[in-house]
Image (spheres, rainbow, N blue to C red):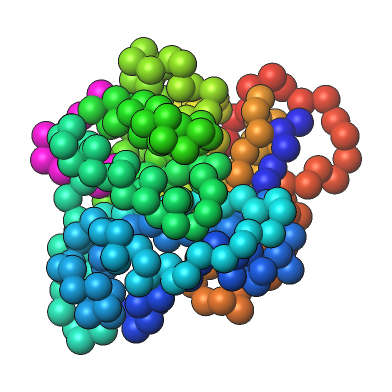
Amino acid sequence: MAQVSYVCPSLRQKTNAFRGGLAGRWEKDAQHGCTYCEINAGFITTVAEEEATGLPMHAMLTPAAVHTLYGEGKRLPDGVRYLLNTESSFPHTDRFGTRHPAAVLRWDDRVWLIEFVQMLILISAHLGKPADVIVIHPGKAHNMTFSAIARAMWYIRNAYADACGTVPAVLIQNGYPSLIQSGDDIREFWQTIQTQAPECCDTCGVLFDPMALQSAAHHANVSLSTYLSALPANALKGFFMRPDGGDKKGDDAIPWDSIFRAIRMLPHDAIVIPDIRRPDEIKEILARCRMGCTPVETVEEADQPTIS
């Protein structure tokens, strides 16, 4: 049975430019019993961050910006572990009502990619230790290919490891709309990684978002079960989840029981990030995730899980 580790999620604040350091986050998150805490490693995405750093919207962080946004470094408690969640690349509206387009993620641009990794290394150096997990997002850049994203994941993993001394798991989160949004997309992307970067398959993979897959299926007028049946179990290294109370029914309802059963049957360990919208939801959503991922009893299960 897979070992499931939990991540205490971070909420982005539109009006507060201070993202916070690792020590302070760990002290607050430890009460929830999570293995990791999530650190926002996105670009400049709010007016408050623009004003605090002097950088434009969607700019990568400079050393001065990292110091401003993450505060002074502190001595880290023993056992601190964290996840860097990078730019999600979705359009957003700022606190003044101005609509901003999504940041362009240029995974096929080597100069841009080097700058991107250097920013992550800079953040980790400031925080005081390397990240265990790095989450990236596909974006919707024109003419981007799965091959380019797979090569970028390989580069991020190796360049970060060379600089920080720790090989991170690099996970890509499916999204809607994005280049990786359907069940077939996830399967084809995983096949690309297996072909082009097989040495990364033990740690790299997909952070699966069932809600995003549900949205993609709805807009494509395809049954959710069709998308779910295409998912390759070996690719699913993490889950971004907001399970409901089981009261939603119908063909488009997310089959949470099946998803939790598949997690318990995975041939590898996985992380779970609760999808929260408000700070007061953390305890409840974490409890739902833990309840679903904990087997009621020990049973003989198939070698490969199926979600349907």
242 to 83, vertically: above or below: below
Please identify the quadrant where the C terminus is shown: top right
Name the residue at the left extreme. Answer: 142
Q: Is residue 246 visible?
A: no
Q: Which residue is at a point 46% across and 22% down the rendered structure image?
A: 200
239 to 23, vertically: above or below: above
Q: Which residue is at a point 62% across and 50% down the rendered structure image?
A: 81
Q: Is residue 140 magenta?
A: yes
Q: Is residue 39 visible?
A: yes
Q: Which residue is at a point 53% across and 34% down the rendered structure image?
A: 166
Report the front residue among 208 and 243.
Answer: 208
Report the front residue among 162 and 274.
Answer: 162
Report the front residue among 24 and 231.
Answer: 24
57 to 158, vertically: above or below: below
Name the residue at the bottom extreme. Answer: 96
| Left or right of residue 278, residue 189 in this image | left
Magenta stretch, main secondary structure class: loop
| Left or right of residue 137, residue 51 in this image | left
Residue 290, image x, y percentages? 73, 54
Residue 11, image x, y percentages? 47, 70
| Magenta stretch, residue numbers | 137-147
Please identify the quadrant where the N terminus is shown: top right
Residue 174, image x, y percentages? 38, 44
Residue 125, image x, y percentages? 45, 51
